[in-house]
Structure formats: C-alpha cells, structure tokens
Image (cartoon, coloured by chain):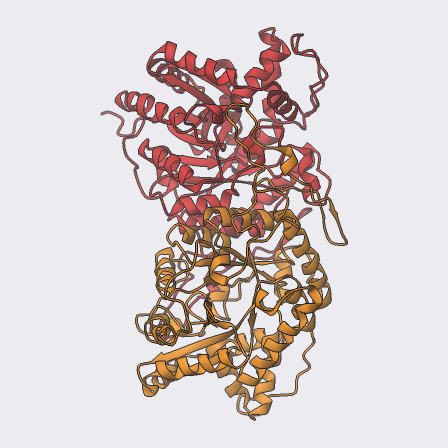
Chain colours: A orange, B red
Amino acid sequence: MTDPTPRRMHLGLFLLGTGSHVAGWRMPGAVDSFQDLSAIQEIARTAERGCFDLIFIGDNLYADPAAHPSYTLRLEPLTLLAALATTTRHIGLGATVSTTYADPFTVARAFASLDHISGGRAAWNAVTTANPATAANFGTTHPDHARRYERAGEFLDVVRGLWDGWADDAVVADRASGLYIDPAGLRALDHHGPFFTVKGPLNIGRAPQGRPIVLQAGGSEAGLDLAARTADVVFSVVQDLDEARAAYAALKGRLPAHGRRPQDVTVLPGVMPVVGRTEREAFDTLAQLQGFVGERNALALLSDRLGQDMSAYDLDGPVPEIALPDSYHSFARVMLAKARREGMTLRDLYNLTAAARGHWVLCGSAETVADTLQHWFETGAADGFNIMPPYFHDGFTAFVDLVVPLLQERGLFRREYPGATLRDTLGLARPERA
Amino acid sequence: MTDPTPRRMHLGLFLLGTGSHVAGWRMPGAVDSFQDLSAIQEIARTAERGCFDLIFIGDNLYADPAAHPSYTLRLEPLTLLAALATTTRHIGLGATVSTTYADPFTVARAFASLDHISGGRAAWNAVTTANPATAANFGTTHPDHARRYERAGEFLDVVRGLWDGWADDAVVADRASGLYIDPAGLRALDHHGPFFTVKGPLNIGRAPQGRPIVLQAGGSEAGLDLAARTADVVFSVVQDLDEARAAYAALKGRLPAHGRRPQDVTVLPGVMPVVGRTEREAFDTLAQLQGFVGERNALALLSDRLGQDMSAYDLDGPVPEIALPDSYHSFARVMLAKARREGMTLRDLYNLTAAARGHWVLCGSAETVADTLQHWFETGAADGFNIMPPYFHDGFTAFVDLVVPLLQERGLFRREYPGATLRDTLGLARPERA
C-alpha cells in the first residue's frame, strides 16, 4: 500500500515592495512602485497560478529614505491584504503586525475580520520589531529583546484567547424568536497579565479557520521558544544547508515540550531565487542586479541589519569584529558567521546584504534551483520555502513558470489547492476552542 | 448668466450591519449577517448605482449580545473598506476609528494606505468612543468627555501632520541614477504634545487626495469645535427640522473662527428613511419593523444610548428624569428632548430608539420623502443626508430606486460622479501641504 498523501513542499511568496533585492526596481521593466495596487494584484495572481500556499507582506514602522526603498514606502499590510482578498480565491494572505507596537484586541479583531473577508485565508506574521527607530513614532522607548519577547508571548496568548471567544453556533439569527446571538456562545477572556488586561470577547464571530494562521520568523532562543509554542509556520533565515538543517532541527526539537508534533509547524527557509533558462542567464541576471547596487544604499541597509553605523569602516578591509547583542535579529548573526567563514571584505558583505538582506541567494538554471530545493526538502532542512523574488514581475514569473513545473513533475508540489482555507492548504486541522 | 454649478445634495450611506433598525434583520428576505462580504459588496454596488458620495461604517470596540446585533458582530472597518475598494470604482469609503483607543501613526498610515488602494476615496470617521465598556478591552480606564476631546484634537493634528510629511514628488524612482526617494521631499513631524510624541514621517507616500477626508459626528460643544476646526463632513443627530437648522447653523457659524468657509464642511443629518410606493406601504413597513422589536433588545439599546440601566423603570410610565452628563453622546440629549416635548412613555422612547437609535425616522411615499429632504436642504438644515436604511437590501433599494430619481429629476442630486476622488465628489480641493 502506498502512502496516499506524500509529503509535499509548501511555498510562500514574500512580498517586499519592489522585490527583495535592494536595487531590483532598477531592472529594465521591473515594477518600481509598491503603492500601485494593480501591480500587486498581478503578483498575487501569479502566485496563485503557481499554487503558492500564501503571499505575505513584511512591514516596518518608520521611514528611512537611505535604506531599502520598500522600507520607506509601502502600503499598510492589513488594508493591502484585504484588498487582495477580493481579487484572489485560494492563496493565503499573511500580514505582518508588531506585538510591540499594537494592542491585542485590535490585532485579534483585524485578523478575524480578514479571515471572514477572505473565506478563511488570513495569516498573522507576528513580529517583535527589531529596529529601535520605531519607538519615536509611538512616543515610547524601544523595549529590549527579552522584554519584547515576554510581551509577544502574552500578546499571542491574548489574541488566541480572543479568537476562541465565540462558539461557531453563537450566531443564531432566528427570525421567528428574534434571538440574534446566543449569549451562551460567547465567553469573556478576562485576561490579566503583566502587559495586558483584556476582557473580551471580540465583537466579531469565530473566524472561518477557527483561528487564523500564525507566522513567525524569530531565530533567537526566545524567538524559537515562542514559535515552538504558538506558530503554525516559521520562516528561517539561513545561508547554507547546514544552517538550514540546524535551524529546522532546533525548531522541530522544541515542539514536543509544548505537546506539538513535527507536522504541526511548517518550516520555510527564506531564499532569493535568481532563475535563468541556463546557468549563464541566471548569473548574468544576478550580476546585472548587483551592478545596480549603490554604495550608499548598501551601506545604509547593512547598518540597519547590523544595528550600527558601518560607514566609517574600510570597504575593502575585512569585516570588522563587532559586538552583536542578542537583541538584534538573526540576519545579523547569520551574515556575520558567513562573512567570517568565507573571509569576506566589508564590500562582499554589503553586496550580499544588498542582494537578499541576509537571506540565502540561490542562483542557477531552473533545474539547478529545483534540484537544490528538492535536496534541502528531502534532507531535513525545510518543509518548503519562503520565496523572495529579487524583483517583479520577471524575477518571480521565472520561478513560477520554470521551477514550479519541475517541482510538480517530480511530485514535490501540488498542482491545485486542496480546499478552501489556508489551513486546508497547509494540511492543518481547524482547531477546537480551547 | 446662470450659475454653472447649482448647489447639489450629498448623500452618505451609513452601514450598520443588518441595518439601522434594531430588528431589521427579521424582515422577510433581509440580510441577516454582517460577516458576509458578498452582501456588503451588493450594498456598496447599490449605493454606487445611486451615485452616493460615500459609504461609511460605524464601529464599536466591545461586544454586548443584548444590544443591537450589529454592535456585537461586525467586520473591522478598515479591512472591510479595503475589500470594498476593489469592487467599487467611485464611491467614497469611510471607516470609523477611535481617537481614544488607537494611535495616530497607525491611523494616519492605514488611511493613507486605503487612499492609495482606492485611488483617492478614503475617509476617516474620527470618533472619541462614548461607551466606557470599551476600556476593559484595552486595559485602561475610559477618559472623561473633556479629556477624550483634548486627545482627539491632538490626535487629528498629528494625523494631518503625518499626512503632510511627504511631498508629491518625493518618490523619484530614477532607474538611471539609482535614486528612489528624494530625502528633501520628506519632512519629520517631530510632534511633542500632552498625549502624543511622534517623530514621523510616515512610511507611505502622500495620499492621492493629499489628505484623506475627515468625517465627524460629535454634537457636544467640544465636538462642534473639533469638527469646525478639522472635519470635512459632519453627521448631525437630529429629530426635527428646527433641531437640524440649529445644528447646521451652530456648525457653520463656528467655521470663520478657524479660517474656514461654509462650503468647506458638508453637514449631513442622519435619517432613517422608510420608503413606500405609497404612504400606506411605507407605514405598513414601519409597523412591521416595530412589531419585530423585542422588549429585551430595545431596553438594552436604550440603556446603552442613555448610559444607564433603564430596566427598573415602568415601561408605560413617563420617561423618568435622568441626569445626563455632558460626557454622553448627542443621541441621548436629542431623544430625551423629543420625549419630553411629546410626552412620551418609556415604551415610546424605546420604540423610537429601536427604530433608528436616536436618529430621525422619515416614513412615507417616495414623493413625501423627496419633498421633505428637499425642504430641509433648501431651508438651512442640511447639505445632504446620511442615509441609514432600516434593513438591507429592500430597505435601501427602495430609497435608491424610488427617491434618488426624484431628487435627480429635480436637479437636486448628481446623475454621475464628477471625478475620480471623494474630494472631487464632495467638491473639495486637494489640499497643499501645510
């Protein structure tokens, strides 16, 4: 008897404005605006044509015109995804919202609403916000890493509790008796914690998915613990196969302590694929992209990623020894480790950062890219991938039109959506109310 | 020479879930869910067919299953309107967000985003949130009326300042030079006030409308002052023509002190039209609606509106003398004044509340309704109306299909949209950056 449900890859599309490459918008014909809804609608249609599990939108909460253009100029994720909900039918819709700079009642409600609007396709990418510049827009001081994760843990508990406040059958709407809501179907949360006091319930009924999907990307110890306890999908930041296997094992290994099984969490390493019909074409594209990188942008981006001003260092000297507090995000650790491993100059490092902001760059022919993804998928490094196109549209359609069909031919990836909701696509059951 | 631009009415559609009547959902065939996007999309299409200026969504931030069903069960306004943006082309999209329970950076950004997504049709209904039950969902205590309005004033200043942070030409996106954003086109706000400290600028470019439209409904002294200073559209709560004229004059009279002209603010009294092909049909419909009112819901709604528990009083006795702090919203004052004027019992008052929550009910044939609206419009009571259908869809299509054509025939209302943005529809110029 053969296994009726072979293990299949999951694919997310990471939408960072004009693409993940800092200068991707300079490619001839590339999308050069992220405030143009019609371009984003086309990207979403392409992702859905490629049967992607979800499209998800990063976020930040401050403007830095010297850094990646998409950090400074972007549509707000929840409004954008609600707009995409009506022009897509199957693909999951993930919006980033910070647990440090929002409140749980508002967040729980907004994602429940997006889940209703999209017919069960909402996902929340819960981030703690690394960059301290954010605080100045919210009249507060930026909490340290530990405190951000303490707050995030409680924030997620409150949100999940609020999502469970309504029974599925609480809405009666009985014309004859006049009973619209059965009060017995509602439950207050009455949460009292160090960060939040929230009575509940929400003023919106139980979401089609029961609870919208929770995405996370934290790679620190605290981040891994939180993800193991609360996430459905985890994005990992890696530069090579060994790192990816280690990150995969680290996350999966933490699940049993929270009563969860390996298949309950989908681990997706981030990858920027640069795909050509031939190896040569792919490397030419990458070289073209790197040729567009301006020193100023690249240094600003590197400084942002490393949390300190790098402009005083010699670009052609070695990567300096810099102290990296645990409070900074995993990109920095991963990139510095690679730089030291490979004896990079600071210029090498900023070129790497400019390309994919610290994520893995996979450049090659469609066959090479498919082979590599398959190898990672089959050797304990990934449940699928978080695809970060360098630019749009060609930088993404190359993947969808050249790589996805190879993965499908090999039985590694779906040819159609299995059900109506993102939970169905991820193979996750609808949760009972806790 | 005739005036090339005769004064025309403006019409808003107030979308309160299953309709403004507390029991409207019990009408045969009525929409009985407000979590069903397709029903709301149909309502929006109807409003656009009727050339309405805008559709706007009320809000609250707590669940009370004993009150109006739409208070307890509704989609979140910003996600809902973003979803409607893609299925409508002309109509303005107004979302209610509280200045007491949100932060200005998030709000400014979300409405700028909605304005980009909708091509210049976003409007923010800025409310201070009257019901103290809200505070328990946000771990805080409910500020008193004066403090809420102080905060609202500063909140609006910050939001408007943030909307002005980007020059229209700040986005350069010059492929040749690699300059994406011209830093000279961005301006920090550096706001430091009693309630908020916000650096800015936003991480989204200047909105298509320059600034999204600001709606307000406060009827208190503080509310009128805030509206006179900051609102583009004001919804008034009135029960008769004299009240409407007084409210209209009160608002318009305050404009010169803020350097504004009468035509800078559009005043729309709220009205629940119950329209029939004949007078008899209209009054039969109203009677049918009132027959659906349950004592429990009506009392809960009345208690909510008056800010105190009314269940201990004799329903068939006179409306008791109750002390009404200025902190409570204008519905209460207007309703109590009417009740005393007309010698109502408490049952009369709750029936009135159940019908339209304190707003004016206008019941009659299409001709009667059109005549009355015209009279109000032409005698200093209104620049148009905020239409609050008792239920959907028939309770709204009756107005669009029977009353709107009469208003159009009389030259009182547009037959097509004059431009692309809500500002165009309202006849308001795109503001320069302050």
Vertical order, A83 against B383 (above or below): below
Q: In this rendering, would A171 be left or right of B283?
A: right
Q: Which quadrant holds residue B330?
A: top right
From the viewer's side, name the closer residue of A298 and A399.
A399
Whole-percent x, y for residue B320 in the image: 69, 12
Whole-percent x, y for residue B366 in the image: 34, 16
Vertical order, B421 against A302 (above or below): above
From the viewer's side, name the closer residue of A433 and A317.
A433
From the viewer's side, name the closer residue of B203 and A130.
A130
Q: In this rendering, would B273 be left or right of A157?
A: left
Q: In this rendering, would A131 be left or right of B309?
A: left
Q: Residue at position x 41%, y 54% from top?
A: A84
Q: Residue at position x 28%, y 20% from top?
A: B410
Query: Furthest residue to the left?
Result: B1
Vertical order, A71 against A423 (above or below): below
Query: Furthest residue to the front?
Result: A1
Can residue B49 be seen from the camera position used here? yes
Can residue A365 be seen from the camera position used here? no
Whole-percent x, y for residue A173 in the image: 52, 31
Whole-percent x, y for residue B153 in the image: 60, 40
